[in-house]
Image: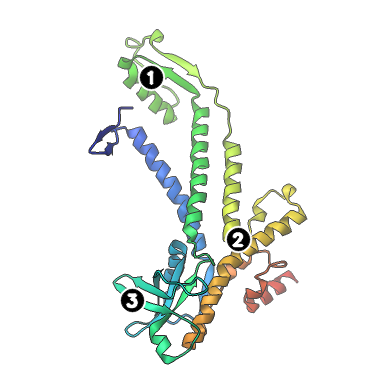
Amino acid sequence: MGRIKKKNNLVKIPNNREFLESAELNSLTYIDFLERFQRIALSMFEWVNLPNSMDSRYLERCLYFYGQASLLLDPKYGYINTKCSSNNKVNIYGLPTELKCYSYEYNTSRLLYTGLKSEEAKKKECILVMNNWNKTPTVQSMRLFAQRLYEAERSSDVNIRAQKYPLILITPENKRLSMENIYSQLDGNKPAIMVNKENYEPNSIQAIKTDSPFVADKLQEYKMRIWNEALTYLGINNIALEKKERLVTGETSENNEVINMNLWSMLAPRKEGCKKFNELFDENIDVRVRSDLYNVIKTEMSSVSDLIPSDIKEKEGESNE
């Protein structure tokens, strides 16, 4: 690999195809895992009875990426949901007294709803919806999980390739291009490599065996543990993904409670936002766990079982009879 030259404090990446391809694959692997988590997280909750002028998809994206969002009544657009940021003043409960509510080509400042319902309050106040009680964006943790999964996946790829040709080739500089071509043919799974006998010098090439151990299976198990840990963090039951012989009733129940509390930590603040919105604007919006997610959540010992829609519970009960 050629040297990396610096000019004006900028790093110039050498023109090395293998380096660039590997760097691109690294980025794609990380992004792929991160987007998988994003799709799951953005599909977990179902907002019910939202006014037509509001967008549940954008609301969940604000919570996922920024940890908070605002609900308000705009004289031009009607009921809307936007991104928001806090001012420097807080009330006695540590909540902001005023929010800057903004979106694409939209910007306004509103007072935080205080609980005093009036027509004037509807025009000047807004509702704060939190992703969790700490207003922490989900994406922060998902980036950490995606980084660990990326490391495991790419390490596994390298280990598998090392089983394919566990050798280090040593050759003079004038034979380097020829060796790179041979290596490329090996990497392309070519069954036989032809060389020119007249140009072939046996003593000019040396090979050192690396004897790389096969650990890809262990890396895949590690990756599965990280994946399950991420699902647990999101409040999604993943105990069924473990091998049956590893399951213990007590451990299953304990894991289930952790899952439910993680789910509750995100559902409860959303419920609180709905409650305050309904108080201020005389509406009837709600949020709940999506019905399809119910099938993979253990609810018999769940602290959120009362939040599952009754019609879904009845259908589940009928199917179990």
Q: Which residue is mark 2?
A: 236
Give the x, y percent position of residue 140.
Answer: 47, 55
Give the x, y percent position of residue 308.
Answer: 63, 73
Number of the front mark, 3 or 1: 3
Q: Look at the numbered discs 3 and 1 and tell me whether their residues touch, using CB distance below 8 Å.
A: no
Give the x, y percent position of residue 21.
Answer: 36, 38
Image height check: is 42 above or below 276?
above
Image height check: is 168 above or below 117?
above
Q: Which residue is mark 3?
A: 108
> Which quadrant: the N terminus?
top left
Q: Which residue is mark 1?
A: 194
Disc number placed over residue 294 in the picture, else none: none
Q: Does 123 sit left or right of 9 as displayed?
A: right
**Quarter of the rendering containing residue 86:** bottom left
Give the x, y percent position of residue 197.
Answer: 35, 11
Sooner in the amino-acid sequence: mark 1 or mark 2: 1
- Residue 293 visible to an observer of this rendering: no
Q: Residue at x 38, y 78 (%)?
A: 110
Image height check: is 171 above or below 75?
above
